[in-house]
Image (cartoon, rainbow, N blue to C red):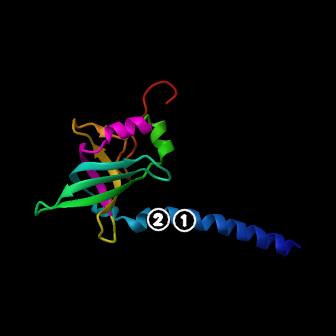
Amino acid sequence: MQTKILLSLSSALLAVAVPLAAHHGTAVSYDQSKSFSVKATVTEFRYANPHPQIYFDVKDEKGNVVHWSGEIAPNAAQLQQEGWGKKRSEAALAPGTEVTITLAPSRAGTPVGLINKIVGPAGESLLGLTPLGAPAPAAEGPGR
């Protein structure tokens, strides 16, 4: 009887642990030691779970447009807690918006990256993002 209970608990733990580990493969997918910044034009922004996505165009050294996509590490709930709800985020990252994006590129060499920072046309930081490994800015106001 104890063996069956132990086996059942072990199976349940494994069933939960494997998907969690698979979801958090950021270090495997992106090379954070090679982060760089690019001037880009937003083509689409999806405020979705598990992570918002941004699609943008970048001109390469020959002037050709390269279509990129990026995963934004904070999830939608975390962005909302920082004051970046869906409407505000979509307005700030509307198609055609010129931004500077700092990202960790895909290890596969494809035009995909983990977004570390987005700077808007007026020089403002968008979505409250800070580069990975950097301390988040201190929250202001009562209760924060």
- Expressed as whole percent of the image width and height from the top left, the position of residue 41 reads 23, 49
Residue lying at 41% horizontally and 36% vertically, measured from the top left: 87
Q: In terms of depth relative to the viewer, which is nearer, 49 or 8?
A: 49
Mark 2–mark 1 distance (CA, rounded to whole Å): 7 Å
Three-letter amino acid code of the residue under disc 1: Ala
| 41 is higher (above) or lower (below) than 7 | above
| 13 is higher (above) or lower (below) than 95 | below
Residue lying at 28% horizontally and 63% vertically, measured from the top left: 34
- Expressed as whole percent of the image width and height from the top left, the position of residue 128 reads 37, 40
Residue furthest bottom as drawn: 3
- Expressed as whole percent of the image width and height from the top left, the position of residue 11 reads 72, 71
Q: Is the residue marked by circle 2 packed among few (<14), some (14-19), or many (20+) residues within 10 Å? A: few
Residue furthest left as drawn: 62
Three-letter amino acid code of the residue under disc 2: Gly
Secondary structure under badge 2?
loop
User: Is residue 84 among the parts visible in the rendering?
Assistant: no
Tell me the residue that label 2 is attached to.
25
Look at the numbered discs 2 and 1 and tell me whether their residues touch, using CB distance below 8 Å. yes
Q: Which mark, by number, is residue 121?
A: none
- Residues in magenta? 85-105
Secondary structure under badge 1?
helix
Tell me the residue that label 1 is attached to.
21
In the drawing, does residue 18 fall left or right of residue 121?
A: right
Q: Is the residue marked by circle 1 packed among few (<14), some (14-19), or many (20+) residues within 10 Å? A: few
User: Is residue 42 among the parts visible in the rendering?
Assistant: yes
Which quadrant of the figure contains the N terminus?
Answer: bottom right
| 4 is higher (above) or lower (below) than 130 | below
- Expressed as whole percent of the image width and height from the top left, the position of residue 12 reads 71, 66
Q: In terms of depth relative to the viewer, which is nearer, 93 or 121?
A: 93
Residue lying at 82% horizontally and 69% vertically, measured from the top left: 5
Residue furthest top as drawn: 142
